[in-house]
Amino acid sequence: MDAKVTWKTGLSFTGETGSGFQIPLGTAVDHGGDGSAPGPMEVVLVALGGCTAMDVISILEKKQQKVSGFEIKVHGDRAEAHPKVYTDITLEYIVTGTNLDPEAVKRAVELSETKYCSVNAMLKKTANVTTKVTLKEA
């Protein structure tokens, strides 16, 4: 895989994936940026959420679960000292559907967490990653 980051102005950049997608990057006003784009560490949390979301939805479809809504809330706490890595990350899976099997949902999350999500595997080397599952009947 390849990517590149091109400087625009100040602390604003454009990231480009090897597959041609562009992602604006920046930093918050209180950190010297203009606040016009997410910072790299925010994007890491989005990448984690996206990685595990794809796993869980795919597994739930294979388990024939009737999911009508799905979201993951991701919260990260960072170290005080540089390089300010994530030390604790919480993922809350909110799954809405009809007659969802709680064990099937729990297993899908577990498989993503322990086997499939490469972003999670990387982050677990520096952060304590915890999960919470909330089921809602449609």
Image (cartoon, rainbow, N blue to C red):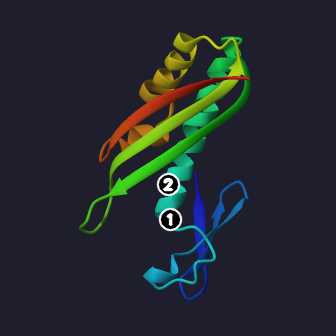
Q: CA distance from mark 1 to mark 2?
A: 6 Å
Q: Position of residue 64 (x, y in %)?
A: 71, 11
Q: Is residue 120 above or below residue 76?
A: above
Relative vertical location of residue 84 with respect to residue 96 in this rendering, above or below: below
Rendered image quadrant of residue 67: top right
Q: Are marks 1 and 2 in contact (CB under 8 Å)?
A: yes
| Amino acid type at mark 2 | Val
* Residue, far bottom: 10
Residue at 41%, 52% (x, y): give it. Answer: 76
Question: For this rendering, which residue is in front, 100 or 45?
Answer: 100
Residue at 51 percent of width and 82 percent of height: 29
**So how many labels did they put on this image?**
2
Density class for disc 2 (Cα within 10 Å; few <14, some 14-19, many ≥20) is some
Q: Which mark is residue 40?
A: 1
Q: Which mark is residue 135?
A: none
Q: Which mark is residue 44?
A: 2
Name the residue nearer the viewer: 49 or 30: 30
